[in-house]
Image: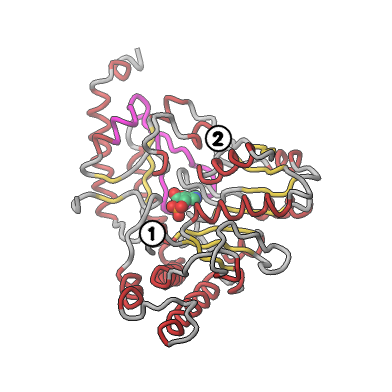
Protein backbone atom coordinates (compact mmCIF):
# COMPACT_ATOMS: atom_id res chain seq x y z
CA UNK A 1 0.00 0.00 0.00
CA UNK A 2 2.84 2.37 0.75
CA UNK A 3 4.10 2.05 -2.80
CA UNK A 4 0.92 3.77 -3.88
CA UNK A 5 1.04 7.31 -5.14
CA UNK A 6 -1.27 9.42 -2.97
CA UNK A 7 -3.31 11.92 -4.99
CA UNK A 8 -6.31 12.26 -2.69
CA UNK A 9 -5.32 15.09 -0.35
CA UNK A 10 -8.74 16.76 -0.66
CA UNK A 11 -10.24 13.64 0.92
CA UNK A 12 -7.79 13.54 3.80
CA UNK A 13 -4.14 14.05 4.68
CA UNK A 14 -1.80 12.21 7.04
CA UNK A 15 -0.95 13.84 10.38
CA UNK A 16 2.45 15.45 10.08
CA UNK A 17 5.11 14.25 12.50
CA UNK A 18 5.24 17.65 14.25
CA UNK A 19 1.50 17.40 14.88
CA UNK A 20 1.78 13.88 16.32
CA UNK A 21 4.69 14.98 18.54
CA UNK A 22 2.76 17.99 19.81
CA UNK A 23 -0.30 15.87 20.67
CA UNK A 24 1.37 12.88 22.35
CA UNK A 25 1.92 14.29 25.88
CA UNK A 26 -1.77 15.18 26.14
CA UNK A 27 -2.94 11.59 25.70
CA UNK A 28 -0.99 10.10 28.58
CA UNK A 29 1.02 12.46 30.79
CA UNK A 30 -0.94 15.70 30.68
CA UNK A 31 -4.33 14.08 30.33
CA UNK A 32 -6.34 16.45 32.56
CA UNK A 33 -9.74 17.83 31.77
CA UNK A 34 -9.48 21.56 30.95
CA UNK A 35 -12.67 22.08 32.98
CA UNK A 36 -11.12 20.60 36.18
CA UNK A 37 -10.37 23.82 37.97
CA UNK A 38 -9.11 22.40 41.30
CA UNK A 39 -5.81 20.74 40.42
CA UNK A 40 -2.76 21.08 38.16
CA UNK A 41 -3.90 18.36 35.73
CA UNK A 42 -6.83 20.56 34.76
CA UNK A 43 -4.78 23.76 34.84
CA UNK A 44 -2.18 22.31 32.45
CA UNK A 45 -4.83 21.11 30.03
CA UNK A 46 -6.61 24.48 30.15
CA UNK A 47 -3.30 26.27 29.48
CA UNK A 48 -2.65 23.98 26.51
CA UNK A 49 -6.08 24.71 24.99
CA UNK A 50 -5.66 28.45 25.56
CA UNK A 51 -2.23 28.36 23.96
CA UNK A 52 -3.66 26.44 20.99
CA UNK A 53 -6.43 29.02 20.58
CA UNK A 54 -3.90 31.85 20.64
CA UNK A 55 -1.79 30.07 18.01
CA UNK A 56 -4.77 29.58 15.69
CA UNK A 57 -6.07 33.11 16.16
CA UNK A 58 -2.63 34.51 15.36
CA UNK A 59 -2.19 32.25 12.30
CA UNK A 60 -5.61 33.17 10.88
CA UNK A 61 -5.64 36.79 12.04
CA UNK A 62 -8.90 36.40 13.96
CA UNK A 63 -10.03 37.07 17.53
CA UNK A 64 -9.66 34.08 19.92
CA UNK A 65 -13.32 34.33 20.94
CA UNK A 66 -14.36 33.74 17.32
CA UNK A 67 -13.17 30.11 17.48
CA UNK A 68 -15.34 27.21 18.67
CA UNK A 69 -13.86 23.69 18.61
CA UNK A 70 -16.00 20.98 17.03
CA UNK A 71 -15.53 17.43 15.75
CA UNK A 72 -14.93 18.65 12.20
CA UNK A 73 -16.34 20.70 9.36
CA UNK A 74 -19.57 18.71 9.12
CA UNK A 75 -20.43 19.53 12.72
CA UNK A 76 -19.47 23.18 12.20
CA UNK A 77 -21.75 23.37 9.15
CA UNK A 78 -24.61 21.89 11.18
CA UNK A 79 -23.88 24.34 13.99
CA UNK A 80 -23.94 27.41 11.74
CA UNK A 81 -26.83 26.55 9.42
CA UNK A 82 -29.13 25.20 12.14
CA UNK A 83 -27.98 27.88 14.59
CA UNK A 84 -28.68 30.78 12.21
CA UNK A 85 -32.02 29.19 11.22
CA UNK A 86 -33.07 28.94 14.87
CA UNK A 87 -31.83 32.36 15.86
CA UNK A 88 -33.05 34.31 12.83
CA UNK A 89 -36.37 32.64 11.98
CA UNK A 90 -38.19 35.62 13.47
CA UNK A 91 -36.74 37.65 10.57
CA UNK A 92 -37.32 35.15 7.78
CA UNK A 93 -36.98 31.56 6.65
CA UNK A 94 -35.18 31.98 3.34
CA UNK A 95 -31.65 30.65 2.77
CA UNK A 96 -29.52 30.86 -0.38
CA UNK A 97 -26.85 28.34 -1.24
CA UNK A 98 -25.36 26.81 -4.40
CA UNK A 99 -25.85 23.54 -6.26
CA UNK A 100 -22.10 22.85 -6.01
CA UNK A 101 -21.80 22.82 -2.21
CA UNK A 102 -20.36 19.92 -0.27
CA UNK A 103 -23.03 17.40 0.74
CA UNK A 104 -22.66 18.51 4.35
CA UNK A 105 -24.26 21.85 3.43
CA UNK A 106 -26.77 20.39 0.96
CA UNK A 107 -27.98 17.76 3.43
CA UNK A 108 -28.42 20.30 6.25
CA UNK A 109 -30.34 22.55 3.83
CA UNK A 110 -32.61 19.61 2.95
CA UNK A 111 -33.16 19.03 6.68
CA UNK A 112 -34.07 22.69 7.16
CA UNK A 113 -36.46 22.56 4.20
CA UNK A 114 -38.34 19.78 6.00
CA UNK A 115 -38.51 22.15 8.95
CA UNK A 116 -40.27 24.86 6.91
CA UNK A 117 -37.30 26.85 5.61
CA UNK A 118 -37.12 27.78 1.94
CA UNK A 119 -33.78 27.22 0.22
CA UNK A 120 -32.78 28.69 -3.15
CA UNK A 121 -30.01 26.71 -4.86
CA UNK A 122 -27.94 28.88 -7.20
CA UNK A 123 -26.67 27.37 -10.45
CA UNK A 124 -23.00 27.47 -11.30
CA UNK A 125 -21.63 28.18 -14.77
CA UNK A 126 -19.35 25.81 -16.75
CA UNK A 127 -16.41 27.25 -14.79
CA UNK A 128 -18.08 26.38 -11.49
CA UNK A 129 -18.83 29.99 -10.55
CA UNK A 130 -22.12 31.42 -9.34
CA UNK A 131 -23.56 34.48 -11.05
CA UNK A 132 -23.37 37.57 -8.85
CA UNK A 133 -26.29 39.02 -10.79
CA UNK A 134 -28.43 35.95 -10.02
CA UNK A 135 -27.43 36.13 -6.35
CA UNK A 136 -28.53 39.75 -6.31
CA UNK A 137 -31.90 38.85 -7.84
CA UNK A 138 -32.39 35.92 -5.44
CA UNK A 139 -31.74 37.90 -2.24
CA UNK A 140 -34.97 38.87 -0.48
CA UNK A 141 -35.90 40.79 2.62
CA UNK A 142 -36.46 37.45 4.42
CA UNK A 143 -33.11 35.93 3.34
CA UNK A 144 -31.40 35.21 6.65
CA UNK A 145 -28.34 33.37 5.37
CA UNK A 146 -26.22 32.98 2.26
CA UNK A 147 -24.01 29.84 2.28
CA UNK A 148 -21.35 29.66 -0.44
CA UNK A 149 -18.45 27.22 -0.60
CA UNK A 150 -15.18 29.14 -0.92
CA UNK A 151 -13.00 26.49 -2.61
CA UNK A 152 -14.75 23.51 -4.12
CA UNK A 153 -13.51 20.14 -2.84
CA UNK A 154 -13.95 18.45 -6.23
CA UNK A 155 -12.84 21.04 -8.76
CA UNK A 156 -10.86 23.45 -6.55
CA UNK A 157 -12.81 26.39 -8.05
CA UNK A 158 -12.74 29.50 -5.83
CA UNK A 159 -15.83 31.76 -5.60
CA UNK A 160 -15.56 35.58 -5.53
CA UNK A 161 -16.44 35.88 -1.84
CA UNK A 162 -15.75 39.61 -1.57
CA UNK A 163 -18.57 40.41 -4.01
CA UNK A 164 -20.82 37.80 -2.42
CA UNK A 165 -20.13 39.29 1.03
CA UNK A 166 -20.87 42.84 0.02
CA UNK A 167 -24.20 41.90 -1.65
CA UNK A 168 -25.29 39.66 1.23
CA UNK A 169 -24.47 42.26 3.86
CA UNK A 170 -26.09 45.07 1.89
CA UNK A 171 -29.24 42.95 1.99
CA UNK A 172 -28.89 42.40 5.76
CA UNK A 173 -28.21 38.66 5.30
CA UNK A 174 -25.50 36.73 7.15
CA UNK A 175 -22.80 34.95 5.12
CA UNK A 176 -21.38 31.50 5.80
CA UNK A 177 -18.56 30.11 3.72
CA UNK A 178 -17.29 26.54 3.87
CA UNK A 179 -13.54 27.21 3.91
CA UNK A 180 -12.55 23.61 4.72
CA UNK A 181 -10.55 23.01 1.55
CA UNK A 182 -9.01 26.47 1.34
CA UNK A 183 -7.11 26.36 4.62
CA UNK A 184 -3.39 25.90 4.04
CA UNK A 185 -3.81 26.29 0.27
CA UNK A 186 -4.80 29.94 -0.09
CA UNK A 187 -4.56 32.90 2.25
CA UNK A 188 -7.77 33.26 4.24
CA UNK A 189 -7.01 36.23 6.45
CA UNK A 190 -8.90 38.74 4.27
CA UNK A 191 -11.78 36.36 3.63
CA UNK A 192 -12.31 35.78 7.34
CA UNK A 193 -12.81 39.52 7.73
CA UNK A 194 -15.61 39.39 5.14
CA UNK A 195 -17.71 36.40 6.17
CA UNK A 196 -19.79 35.97 9.32
CA UNK A 197 -19.13 32.25 9.67
CA UNK A 198 -16.64 29.72 8.31
CA UNK A 199 -15.53 26.18 9.12
CA UNK A 200 -12.34 24.14 9.23
CA UNK A 201 -11.31 20.53 9.64
CA UNK A 202 -8.04 19.17 11.11
CA UNK A 203 -7.66 16.19 8.81
CA UNK A 204 -7.56 18.29 5.63
CA UNK A 205 -4.44 20.14 6.81
CA UNK A 206 -2.16 17.39 8.19
CA UNK A 207 -3.88 17.52 11.57
CA UNK A 208 -5.90 14.82 13.32
CA UNK A 209 -9.33 13.57 12.31
CA UNK A 210 -12.29 14.29 14.57
CA UNK A 211 -11.48 17.93 15.30
CA UNK A 212 -12.46 21.13 13.55
CA UNK A 213 -13.45 24.70 14.10
CA UNK A 214 -16.41 26.95 13.67
CA UNK A 215 -15.33 30.53 13.00
CA UNK A 216 -17.86 33.10 14.17
CA UNK A 217 -16.98 36.72 13.48
CA UNK A 218 -18.28 38.97 16.25
CA UNK A 219 -19.04 35.92 18.34
CA UNK A 220 -20.49 36.64 21.80
CA UNK A 221 -21.87 39.83 20.26
CA UNK A 222 -24.16 40.10 17.28
CA UNK A 223 -23.42 36.70 15.68
CA UNK A 224 -23.44 34.38 18.71
CA UNK A 225 -25.31 31.17 17.93
CA UNK A 226 -27.46 28.94 20.10
CA UNK A 227 -25.62 25.72 21.01
CA UNK A 228 -27.01 22.61 19.43
CA UNK A 229 -24.95 20.33 21.67
CA UNK A 230 -26.09 20.99 25.21
CA UNK A 231 -24.34 19.72 28.32
CA UNK A 232 -21.57 20.85 30.62
CA UNK A 233 -21.49 24.48 29.53
CA UNK A 234 -18.05 24.16 27.88
CA UNK A 235 -16.80 26.71 25.34
CA UNK A 236 -18.90 29.50 26.83
CA UNK A 237 -21.98 27.30 26.50
CA UNK A 238 -21.64 27.29 22.71
CA UNK A 239 -20.71 23.61 22.38
CA UNK A 240 -21.13 21.14 25.23
CA UNK A 241 -18.79 18.19 25.81
CA UNK A 242 -15.33 17.68 27.35
CA UNK A 243 -12.80 19.69 25.42
CA UNK A 244 -10.48 17.36 23.48
CA UNK A 245 -7.07 18.70 24.50
CA UNK A 246 -4.76 16.47 22.37
CA UNK A 247 -6.74 16.98 19.17
CA UNK A 248 -6.98 20.73 19.73
CA UNK A 249 -3.23 20.95 20.34
CA UNK A 250 -2.70 18.98 17.12
CA UNK A 251 -5.11 21.16 15.17
CA UNK A 252 -3.31 24.31 16.31
CA UNK A 253 0.08 22.91 15.33
CA UNK A 254 -1.30 21.87 11.93
CA UNK A 255 -2.86 25.28 11.24
CA UNK A 256 0.26 27.11 12.36
CA UNK A 257 2.47 24.99 10.08
CA UNK A 258 0.04 25.39 7.17
CA UNK A 259 0.07 29.18 7.50
CA UNK A 260 3.86 29.38 7.98
CA UNK A 261 4.50 27.40 4.80
CA UNK A 262 1.62 28.79 2.76
CA UNK A 263 3.45 30.88 0.16
CA UNK A 264 6.19 28.34 -0.47
CA UNK A 265 3.71 25.46 -0.70
CA UNK A 266 1.40 27.40 -3.00
CA UNK A 267 4.20 28.01 -5.46
CA UNK A 268 5.48 24.44 -5.30
CA UNK A 269 2.00 22.96 -5.75
CA UNK A 270 1.29 25.25 -8.70
CA UNK A 271 4.42 23.89 -10.40
CA UNK A 272 3.26 20.31 -9.78
CA UNK A 273 -0.28 21.10 -10.94
CA UNK A 274 0.91 22.63 -14.15
CA UNK A 275 3.11 19.64 -14.90
CA UNK A 276 0.33 17.18 -14.12
CA UNK A 277 -2.21 19.05 -16.23
CA UNK A 278 0.12 19.37 -19.20
CA UNK A 279 0.92 15.66 -19.01
CA UNK A 280 -2.73 14.57 -18.73
CA UNK A 281 -3.88 16.92 -21.49
CA UNK A 282 -1.53 15.09 -23.84
CA UNK A 283 -4.00 12.20 -23.63
CA UNK A 284 -6.28 12.48 -26.66
CA UNK A 285 -9.60 14.16 -25.89
CA UNK A 286 -8.77 14.90 -22.22
CA UNK A 287 -10.52 17.99 -20.83
CA UNK A 288 -9.91 19.99 -17.68
CA UNK A 289 -13.10 20.72 -15.79
CA UNK A 290 -11.89 23.82 -14.04
CA UNK A 291 -9.50 25.40 -16.47
CA UNK A 292 -10.28 29.09 -16.53
CA UNK A 293 -11.39 29.82 -12.98
CA UNK A 294 -9.31 30.88 -10.04
CA UNK A 295 -8.75 27.59 -8.25
CA UNK A 296 -6.78 25.72 -5.62
CA UNK A 297 -3.15 25.12 -6.50
CA UNK A 298 -3.30 21.43 -5.58
CA UNK A 299 -6.37 20.19 -7.44
CA UNK A 300 -6.65 18.80 -10.96
CA UNK A 301 -10.03 17.68 -12.27
CA UNK A 302 -9.96 16.02 -15.64
CA UNK A 303 -12.29 13.93 -17.82
CA UNK A 304 -11.32 11.31 -20.36
CA UNK A 305 -14.06 10.71 -22.95
CA UNK A 306 -14.72 7.09 -23.89
CA UNK A 307 -13.54 5.87 -20.49
CA UNK A 308 -15.81 4.66 -17.72
CA UNK A 309 -14.72 6.53 -14.59
CA UNK A 310 -15.54 3.64 -12.25
CA UNK A 311 -13.40 1.28 -14.36
CA UNK A 312 -10.62 3.86 -14.46
CA UNK A 313 -10.61 4.26 -10.67
CA UNK A 314 -10.63 0.48 -10.25
CA UNK A 315 -7.78 0.03 -12.70
CA UNK A 316 -5.74 2.71 -10.94
CA UNK A 317 -6.59 1.73 -7.38
CA UNK A 318 -3.50 -0.37 -6.64
CA UNK A 319 -1.10 2.24 -7.94
CA UNK A 320 -2.69 5.66 -7.48
CA UNK A 321 -4.97 6.68 -4.63
CA UNK A 322 -7.34 9.13 -6.26
CA UNK A 323 -11.06 9.76 -6.60
CA UNK A 324 -13.75 10.91 -8.95
CA UNK A 325 -15.27 13.44 -6.59
CA UNK A 326 -15.74 13.90 -2.89
CA UNK A 327 -14.77 10.95 -0.68
CA UNK A 328 -18.15 11.10 1.06
CA UNK A 329 -19.77 10.47 -2.30
CA UNK A 330 -17.47 8.01 -3.92
CA UNK A 331 -19.71 5.03 -3.18
CA UNK A 332 -22.40 6.68 -5.27
CA UNK A 333 -22.98 5.53 -8.85
CA UNK A 334 -24.42 8.91 -9.80
CA UNK A 335 -22.06 11.33 -11.53
CA UNK A 336 -20.79 14.12 -9.28
CA UNK A 337 -23.48 16.70 -8.46
CA UNK A 338 -20.79 19.39 -8.78
CA UNK A 339 -19.98 18.45 -12.38
CA UNK A 340 -23.63 18.13 -13.37
CA UNK A 341 -24.29 21.54 -11.76
CA UNK A 342 -21.54 22.92 -14.01
CA UNK A 343 -23.50 21.59 -16.99
CA UNK A 344 -20.92 18.93 -17.81
CA UNK A 345 -22.43 16.14 -19.86
CA UNK A 346 -23.24 13.07 -17.69
CA UNK A 347 -21.03 10.83 -19.82
CA UNK A 348 -18.06 13.12 -19.37
CA UNK A 349 -18.83 13.56 -15.67
CA UNK A 350 -18.71 9.75 -15.29
CA UNK A 351 -15.33 9.72 -17.03
CA UNK A 352 -13.64 12.08 -14.59
CA UNK A 353 -10.80 11.95 -12.13
CA UNK A 354 -9.88 14.29 -9.28
CA UNK A 355 -6.21 14.36 -8.41
CA UNK A 356 -5.41 16.38 -5.30
CA UNK A 357 -1.83 16.89 -4.17
CA UNK A 358 -0.26 18.01 -0.93
CA UNK A 359 2.87 18.62 1.03
CA UNK A 360 4.29 15.13 0.46
CA UNK A 361 3.68 15.21 -3.32
CA UNK A 362 6.80 15.27 -5.48
CA UNK A 363 7.56 15.85 -9.16
CA UNK A 364 8.72 12.22 -9.56
CA UNK A 365 5.31 11.04 -8.31
CA UNK A 366 3.55 13.39 -10.73
CA UNK A 367 5.55 11.99 -13.64
CA UNK A 368 4.81 8.44 -12.60
CA UNK A 369 1.08 9.26 -12.26
CA UNK A 370 0.99 10.75 -15.77
CA UNK A 371 2.60 7.60 -17.15
CA UNK A 372 0.23 5.24 -15.32
CA UNK A 373 -2.92 7.22 -16.19
CA UNK A 374 -1.90 7.56 -19.85
CA UNK A 375 -1.36 3.79 -20.14
CA UNK A 376 -4.53 2.93 -18.24
CA UNK A 377 -6.75 5.24 -20.29
CA UNK A 378 -5.30 3.80 -23.50
CA UNK A 379 -5.90 0.23 -22.27
CA UNK A 380 -9.49 0.94 -21.24
CA UNK A 381 -10.23 2.64 -24.55
CA UNK A 382 -8.92 -0.37 -26.47
CA UNK A 383 -11.86 -2.38 -25.22
CA UNK A 384 -14.39 0.35 -26.02
CA UNK A 385 -15.92 -0.09 -29.45
CA UNK A 386 -17.09 3.54 -29.45
CA UNK A 387 -13.50 4.70 -29.16
CA UNK A 388 -12.58 2.80 -32.32
CA UNK A 389 -15.53 4.28 -34.17
CA UNK A 390 -15.14 7.83 -32.88
CA UNK A 391 -13.90 9.37 -36.10
CA UNK A 392 -15.69 7.17 -38.61
N1 LIG B 1 -16.70 20.71 3.49
C1 LIG B 1 -15.82 20.43 2.52
C2 LIG B 1 -15.60 21.40 1.41
C3 LIG B 1 -15.10 19.23 2.56
O1 LIG B 1 -14.24 18.95 1.59
C4 LIG B 1 -15.35 18.33 3.62
C5 LIG B 1 -14.68 17.01 3.65
O2 LIG B 1 -14.72 16.27 2.69
C6 LIG B 1 -16.27 18.68 4.63
C7 LIG B 1 -16.92 19.89 4.51
C8 LIG B 1 -16.54 17.79 5.80
O3 LIG B 1 -15.41 17.76 6.64
P1 LIG B 1 -15.27 16.78 7.89
O4 LIG B 1 -14.71 15.53 7.35
O5 LIG B 1 -14.32 17.48 8.81
O6 LIG B 1 -16.59 16.64 8.51
Residue at the location (23% across, 47% down)? 368
Residue at the location (61% across, 55% down)? 80
The nearer-to-camera label among 2 and 1 is 1
Residue at the location (42% across, 34% down)? 287
Q: Within 10 Å of the Cα at label 1, are there few (<14), some (14-19), or many (20+) other Cα atoms?
A: many
Q: Quadrant of the C terminus?
A: top left
Chain-order first, disc 2 or disc 1 = 2
* SS class, disc 1: loop
Placement of 101 over or under 224, stated as above or below: above
Q: Specify whether 142 is left or right of 39.
A: right
Residue 45 within the segment the image draws in magenta: no
The residue that disc 1 covers is: 209
Going by the picture, which residue comes out furthest to the top? 392
**Residue closest to the eye, 39 or 192:** 39
Magenta-drawn segment: 284-313
Residue 38 spot, x, y in % from top left: 48, 86
The residue that disc 2 covers is: 126
**Residue closest to the eye, 193 or 37:** 37
Whether the residue carrying mark 1 lies under 8 Å from ligand 1 is answered with yes
Residue 186 spot, x, y in % from top left: 50, 60
- Note whether residue 138 is visible: yes
Amino acid sequence: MHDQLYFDCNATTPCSQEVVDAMLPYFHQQFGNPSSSHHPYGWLAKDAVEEATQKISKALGVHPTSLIYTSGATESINMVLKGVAKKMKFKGKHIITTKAEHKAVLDVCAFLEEDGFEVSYLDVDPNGLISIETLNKTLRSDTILVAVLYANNETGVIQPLDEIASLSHKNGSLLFSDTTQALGKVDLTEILGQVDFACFSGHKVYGPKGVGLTYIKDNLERNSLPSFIQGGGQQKEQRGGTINTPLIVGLAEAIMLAQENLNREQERLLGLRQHLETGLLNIEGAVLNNETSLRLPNTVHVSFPYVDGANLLKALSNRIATSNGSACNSASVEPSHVLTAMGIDRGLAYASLRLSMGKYSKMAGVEKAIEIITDTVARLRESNILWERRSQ
